[in-house]
Amino acid sequence: MRKLLFALVVLTIPMACLKDKVDLADLTKNPFDPGYTGPPIFTFDTTYVELVTGPPSYTRQVFQFKVNSDLFLEQNAYSVYVVDPSDTTSTYVEQLPPGTHTLRYYKLEYQTGVELCLTLHLSNNFHIGRGEVLCGTLP
């Protein structure tokens, strides 16, 4: 009986540790992954100029976009890493308030009638996913 029990334990240990290897090329369904190949995550909503009252008061361009959170494998808190090639800046845009999926990027130097294109990356815990370019023209 002891030999049978020992044989069962010895035979089941290697099988319990056997795990499938993860193929990184298959990680294409999660929008937070750099290799995501699904539909677009971001959609352009609008752009406009707003007055910020101070002192000092100033105007800034608002570039508003939406995140398609229906693509998430599960609901997550996230931010969006924005790269603005027109002035070589980058920044994180947060969900304000948390849970909203309409986000805004603010630009102090702007021109009407000039198209602004931004590269947006979904991000959580400072890990950035695939970049998507969104463009909008300030009327």
Image: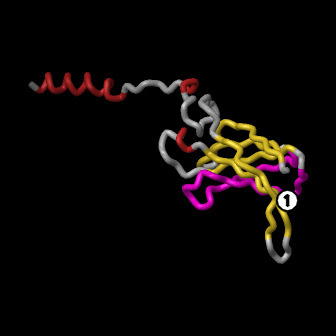
* Residue assigned mark 1: 108
Quarter of the picture holding the N terminus = top left
Q: Residue at x 74, y 54 (%)?
A: 105
- In percent of width and height, residue 22 lies at 50, 27
Q: Is residue 102 above or below residue 60?
A: above
Q: Which residue is drawn at 63% across and 30% down?
A: 35
Q: Which residue is drawn at 66% across and 41% down?
A: 42
- In percent of width and height, residue 8 lies at 20, 24
Q: State how the image is colored.
A: secondary structure
Q: Is residue 10 left or right of residue 91?
A: left
- In percent of width and height, residue 69 lies at 56, 44
- The three-letter amino acid code for the residue at tag 1 is Leu
- In percent of width and height, residue 38 lies at 59, 30
Q: Nearer the viewer, residue 21 or 137?
A: 137
- What's the magenta region? 86-112
Q: Which residue is most to the bottom?
A: 55
Determine which quarter of the picture holds residue 40: top right
- SS class, disc 1: loop
Q: Nearer the viewer, residue 16 or 106?
A: 106
Determine which quarter of the picture holds residue 13: top left
Q: Does the magenta stretch include residue 67?
A: no
Determine which quarter of the picture holds residue 54: bottom right
Q: Is residue 102 above or below residue 15?
A: below
Q: Which residue is most to the left?
A: 1
Q: Residue at x 71, y 44 (%)?
A: 44
Q: Is residue 94 magenta?
A: yes
Q: In this view, does 127 lie to the left or right of 16?
A: right
Q: Is residue 50 left or right of residue 34?
A: right
